[in-house]
Amino acid sequence: MNTIKRFLGLCWIALGPIAMTFLIIQAINKVGLTHTEIERTNAILQWSIIIFIFFPICLGLMIFGYYAFKGEYEKLES
C-alpha cells in the first residue's frame, strides 16, 4: 500500500504543472478565437478568474503529492 501512495504522489506532483499548462494553453486559444474587442475583454477576464482559482488548487496538489512521495502518509492508521 505504501508503494501505491508513493507512486500516486509522483503522479500528483506531475499533474499540477500539467493541469496549469493545459489551462493556460486553453486560455490562449479561446482568447485568440474572439472577434471583437468586447469579446476579447470578456474572455480575458473569464480565463484570468479561472486560472486564479485553479492555480492554488494545482499548487496544493503538488504539495500533497510531495508529502505522499516523501512517505508522510505511511504513519496514518488504516
Image (spheres, grey):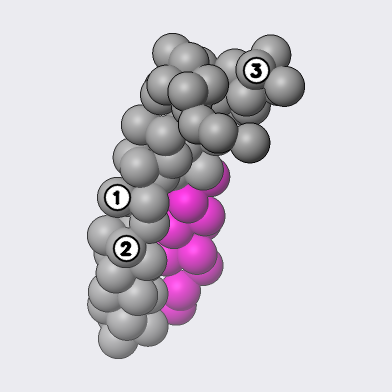
Q: CA distance from mark 2 to mark 1?
A: 7 Å
35 shown above or below 48: below
Q: Magenta segment: does it hold 69?
A: no
Marks 2 and 1 close (CB-CB < 8 Å): yes
Give the structural element (helix, strand or loop) at label 3.
Answer: helix
Relative to 52, 57 lies left or right:
right
Residue occupied by mark 3:
2
Q: Amino acid at mark 2?
A: Ile
Residue at x 46% of width, y 74% of height: 34
Residue 56: mark: 1
Q: Residue furthest bottom?
A: 38
Q: Residues within 10 Å of mark 3 (few under 14, many from 20)?
A: few
Give the structural element (helix, strand or loop) at label 2.
Answer: helix
Residue at x 44% of width, y 77% of height: 35
Residue placed most toward the observer, 53 or 13 = 13
Q: CA distance from mark 2 to mark 3?
A: 31 Å
Residue at x 42% of width, y 21% of height: 72
Residue placed most toward the observer, 33 or 13 = 13
Relative to 39, 76 lies left or right:
right
Main secondary structure type of the part rendered in magenta: helix
Give the structural element (helix, strand or loop) at label 1.
Answer: helix
Q: Residues within 10 Å of mark 1 (few under 14, many from 20)?
A: few
Mark 2 vs mark 3, foreground winner is: 3
Q: Which residues are magenta?
A: 21-35
Q: Amino acid at mark 3?
A: Asn
Give the quadrant of the N terminus.
Answer: top right
Residue 53: mark: 2
Relative to 39, 12 lies left or right:
right
Q: Which mark is first along the chain, 1 or 3?
A: 3
